[in-house]
């Protein structure tokens, strides 16, 4: 699993002209799922996201996790995070999980993340054409891959 995590002051996802999910201060999480992903990847990545100390403390130092600032989370599926650009100029998405694999993992990820951050996670719609709006705070953008646990 790959996640792009952005610290935001606000974010929303729009589908066919209607707002589906919207948050204030918190994290926008773009999630890419590949065929090799398992529930172990979910556990590890949700734990990592919920404990990321990327919010400022009283001294202006990034030292607080999302739970410490009562932040919100917007989770958006994004298969293009698994794009391969090795050959040519047209990305290949061969590693991205097919919907029959990805949708159950996405739903489990959402539920696990809610347990990790102690609140409801807003979402888009898996596989839908979405317009994502955000105000990146900082900017702070972190990329995490569960297959590359640095």
Image (cartoon, helix red, strand yellow):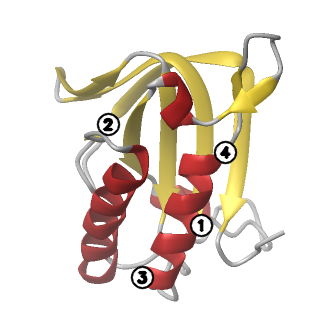
Q: Nearer the viewer, residue 16 or 60?
A: 60
- The N terminus sits in image quarter: bottom right
Residue identified by numbered label 1: 82
SS at circle 4: loop
Q: Nearer the viewer, residue 144 or 59?
A: 59
SS at circle 2: loop
Residue identified by numbered label 3: 39
Up-down: is 58 above or below 43? above
The CA span between labels 1 and 3 is: 18 Å
Residue identified by numbered label 2: 130
Labels 2 and 1: the sequence-earlier one: 1
On the image, the x and y values in percent for residue 114 come to 32, 50
Labels 4 and 2: the sequence-earlier one: 4
Labels 2 and 3: the sequence-earlier one: 3
SS at circle 1: helix
**Residue occupying the point 33% across, 65% down:** 106
From where the camera sits, is residue 80 visible? yes
Residue identified by numbered label 4: 52
The CA span between labels 1 and 4 is: 22 Å
């Amino acid at each position: 699993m790959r996640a792009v995590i952005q610290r935001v002051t606000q974010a929303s996802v729009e589908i066919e002209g209607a707002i589906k999910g919207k948050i204030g201060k918190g994290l926008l999480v773009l999630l890419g799922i590949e065929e090799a992903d398992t529930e172990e990847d979910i556990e590890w990545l949700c734990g990592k996201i919920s404990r990321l100390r990327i919010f400022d403390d009283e001294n202006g130092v990034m030292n607080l996790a999302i739970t410490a600032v009562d932040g919100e989370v917007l989770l958006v599926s994004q298969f293009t995070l698994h794009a391969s650009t090795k050959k040519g100029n047209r990305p290949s998405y061969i590693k991205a999980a097919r919907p029959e694999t990805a949708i159950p993992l996405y739903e489990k990820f959402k539920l696990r993340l809610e347990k990790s951050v102690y609140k409801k996670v807003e979402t888009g719609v898996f596989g839908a054409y979405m317009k994502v709006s955000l105000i990146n705070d900082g900017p702070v953008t972190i990329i995490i891959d569960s297959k590359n646990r640095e």
